[in-house]
Amino acid sequence: MLQYKTVLYCSIERENITASHSSARQRLLETASDLFYRKGIRSIGVDTIAEQSGVGKPTLYRHFSTKDKLISAYLEEENCLHWQWFEEAIAPLQESAKAQLLALIDATTQILTKPGYRGCAFLNALAEFSEEDHPAHRQAIEYKHALRLRLYQLSQQAGARDPDALADQLLLVINGALASAPLFGSSGPSAQLTTIAPYLVDFQL
């Protein structure tokens, strides 16, 4: 499947990144990723990233010629981490696509309760970059389309009467939970994810 290949590729890349964990590029990316996620992409400048990473600006620009390049690298990293998390969440339940869907919902709920959670990195990027030709906008859109495709594949494998509809419904409630948790906390509307999503799955099956 397309997404499985993506995860495998990203896992290989992660191994390479770990091997060079102390490199200037990785320090820059780790610092930028932390700041972009916690404080917003547009609010963080390259001066702040260089200062907090301990890497000089000439070195920063040698690895990332523009801030947009650094933003793209941040979202690529988020994409890889997400698909690694996705496959790990469903891997123990290969015998049942329905169980995989429910396990994904449970795993999503766990993310919402983590300290420092401030929303989906891709939804946040879409909120900051409305320009359709901006790399961050395109990467966020591609990620959400890929997630919708993966939900469709699992829905189809589970035997849903209308896998397209189930994929749309699950994506809608997942995105709603991801967006609601930073506003109302994990005990707010996002807590309904574990009630609504299993109902939708059972209704289709």
Image: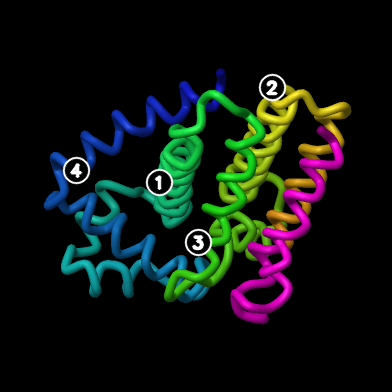
Contact check, label 2 and label 3, Cβ < 8 Å: no
The amino acid pointed to by label 4 is: Thr
Q: CA distance from mark 2 to mark 4?
A: 35 Å
Q: Nearer the viewer, mark 3 or mark 1?
A: 3
Q: Residues within 10 Å of mark 3 (few under 14, many from 20)?
A: some
Q: Which mark is residue 111?
A: 3
Is residue 111 toward the left or the right of residue 170 in the image? left
Magenta highlight range: 177-205
For the image, the number of numbered tags is 4
Q: Residue furthest bottom?
A: 184
Q: Residues within 10 Å of mark 1 (few under 14, many from 20)?
A: some
- Which residue is denoted by mark 4 in the rendering? 18
Q: Nearer the viewer, mark 2 or mark 3?
A: 2
Nearest to N terminus: mark 2 or mark 3? 3
Nearest to N terminus: mark 2 or mark 1? 1
Quadrant into which the C terminus falls: top right
- Which residue is denoted by mark 2 in the rendering? 157
Q: Relative to 121, does residue 51 appear above or below in the rendering?
A: below
Asked which secondary structure carries label 1, the reply is helix
Nearest to N terminus: mark 2 or mark 4? 4
Is residue 191 found inside the magenta-colored segment of the image?
A: yes
Camera-side residue: 144 or 24?
144
The amino acid pointed to by label 1 is: Glu
Q: CA distance from mark 2 to mark 1?
A: 29 Å
